Amino acid sequence: IESQIEGSIDRDEVVQLMKDLQAFRSFSGEEANAMRFLAGWMEERGVETELIDVADEPGRPDLVARIRGSGGGTSLMLNGHLDIDPVALNYPGDPWACYEENGAIFGHGLVNMKSGVASLAAATVAVSRAGATLRGDLLATGVVGELQGGVGAYDLVQRSIGADYTIVCEPSGMDVRTIHSGAIQMLI
């Protein structure tokens, strides 16, 4: 089944998805249109999707896409955020001009983290296209508010939407990390 899944990935389709996602100026609080686009993209390719508004912020949805398993297996979540960093003052050229050069794709928001979101969406669609029989569920989640301390991810946890294992598809130069940084703020 692994070769069938791999064969179900269309590089041009994934590149176009990255470019389409990059075009959205999805700064924190402005992710809804990008999230709706991504949900539609996955639905058009046969994956069950649901948009769920973050509890404290109506109109600001997280995406939960799911391939249901037959039961008895562990579940896996692929996760990424669609809010992007502010554009740096010294950004070279037009940040919204997405382009390819020497096999790489450039454009504001791709590294943090629309390329990761495109990869998790494409992987989920490939599993669906291959007709893989899974025992556990495969979830693909797009969340809002990573730059606000993870409000979208926190909301999913509060709703008990999760999996046995999670891979956050933040681009890392293929350096797999099994830890995550955190922060705590205190007023003394």
Image (cartoon, rainbow, N blue to C red):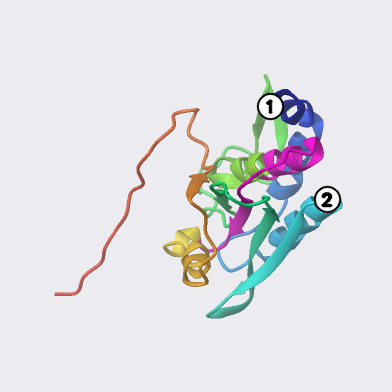
Rendering coords of residue 111 (x, y %): 56, 40
Q: Which mark is residue 46?
A: 2
Q: Is residue 67 left or right of residue 164?
A: right
The quadrant of the rendering that contains the N terminus is top right
Residue 109 makes an appearance in the image? no
Q: Are marks 2 and 1 in contact (CB under 8 Å)?
A: no
Q: Is residue 55 left or right of residue 39?
A: left
Q: Is residue 174 left or right of residue 149?
A: right
Helix, strand, or loop for circle 1? helix
Q: Amino acid at mark 1?
A: Glu
Residue 142 makes an appearance in the image? yes
Q: Nearer the viewer, residue 107 or 171?
A: 171
Q: Earlier in the sequence, mark 2 or mark 1?
A: 1
In this view, 97 is above or below 79: above
State the image quarter where residue 14 is shown.
Answer: top right
Q: Amino acid at mark 2?
A: Gly
Rendering coords of residue 37 (x, y %): 77, 57
Helix, strand, or loop for circle 2? loop
Q: Nearer the viewer, residue 162 or 179?
A: 162
